[in-house]
Image: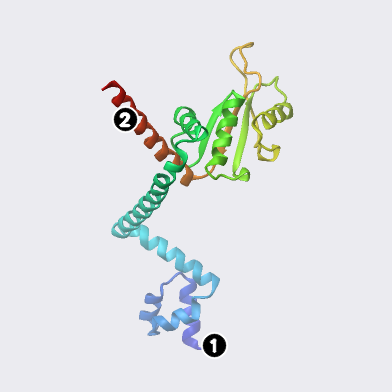
Amino acid sequence: MRKDRQKAEDLRKKGKSYKTISRKLGIPVSTLSDWFRRLDWSITIRNQLAEKSSFSSPEKLQLIMAANKKRWSEWRKEYENQAVIDYPNLKNNPLFIAGLMLYWGEGTKRGHSMRLSNSEPEMIKVFYSFLKLVGISEEKIFVSLLLYPDLIDNVQKNFWSKAVGIPLSQFKKSITIIGRHPTRRLSYGVCTIQVYSNGLKIKIMKWIEMCRNNLLTEFNSNIA
């Protein structure tokens, strides 16, 4: 091994950049890159230096944040545009409208995942059917139960599985709580249906906006 390569390697392992090593030893940056760019330990150092450089420079950090914001905005716009394209083919389907109204009233609006909770099996079944209608595969839909201590977990899971039509394999761990009232309890607990799809959530919120606007337009025209 060349003596200067050994010195370069020692400096690199101390976390020095190619430019620093080049200035110290007079070795071209391209040569240093050829020596170390494929080595795992050097790649780790490269990533550490890049991260340190980003956070030590407010200007670079602002550029990174701006680039990320732009990517997110463009990605979101793609899903909204697709929602606009899909809407005319779905808007006359009663199941589609029912699913939108359910999520508008009962679904979570924050975060990246979609969740809807209710104690009515029919309501959960409608939303489950809606999710499949808009292209979500069964294995991506999960449910969990909120139960009182006197409810038996596997009995309730079997009930909800049959009532909704979702396989037991899609059930997550149930949560058991102690209710404040000794008699006013929900017979089957509360079922939460969840999908981890930020893209679909963006489309659903856009569909709700479009449906709401259509309803308001029709309502105002009837009044006029």
Count of numbered circles on the image: 2
Give the colour scheme of this rendering.
rainbow
State the CA–CA distance, disc 1 to disc 2: 78 Å
Q: Is residue 202 visible to us here?
A: no
Q: Which mark is residue 217?
A: 2
Going from N to C along the chain, the mark reached first, 1 or 2, is 1
Front tag of 1 and 2: 2
Identify residue type, mark 1.
Answer: Met
Label 2 crowd (10 A; few <14 / some 14-19 / many >=20) = few
Q: Is residue 214 left or right of residue 95?
A: left
Residue shown at 41% from the left, 47% from the top? 85
Q: Which mark is residue 74?
A: none
Q: Secondary structure at mark 1?
A: loop
Q: Secondary structure at mark 2?
A: helix
> Residue 41, how many percent across, how many down?
53, 70
Q: Is residue 129 left or right of residue 28?
A: right
Quadrant, the C terminus: top left
Q: Is residue 101 visible to us here?
A: yes
> Residue 173, how many percent across, how many down?
66, 35
Question: Mark 1 = which residue?
Answer: 1
Q: Residue furthest bottom?
A: 2
Relative to 52, say whether 4 is above or below: below
Label 1 crowd (10 A; few <14 / some 14-19 / many >=20) = few
Nearest the camera: 23 or 43?
43
Identify residue type, mark 2.
Answer: Thr
- Please identify the quarter of the rendering in which residue 135 is found: top right
Q: Is residue 30 left or right of residue 58?
A: right
> Residue 194, how many percent across, how many down?
56, 37
Quadrant, the N terminus: bottom right
Residue shown at 39% from the left, 45% from the top? 84
Nearest the camera: 166 or 134?
134
Relative to 210, say whether 62 is above or below: below
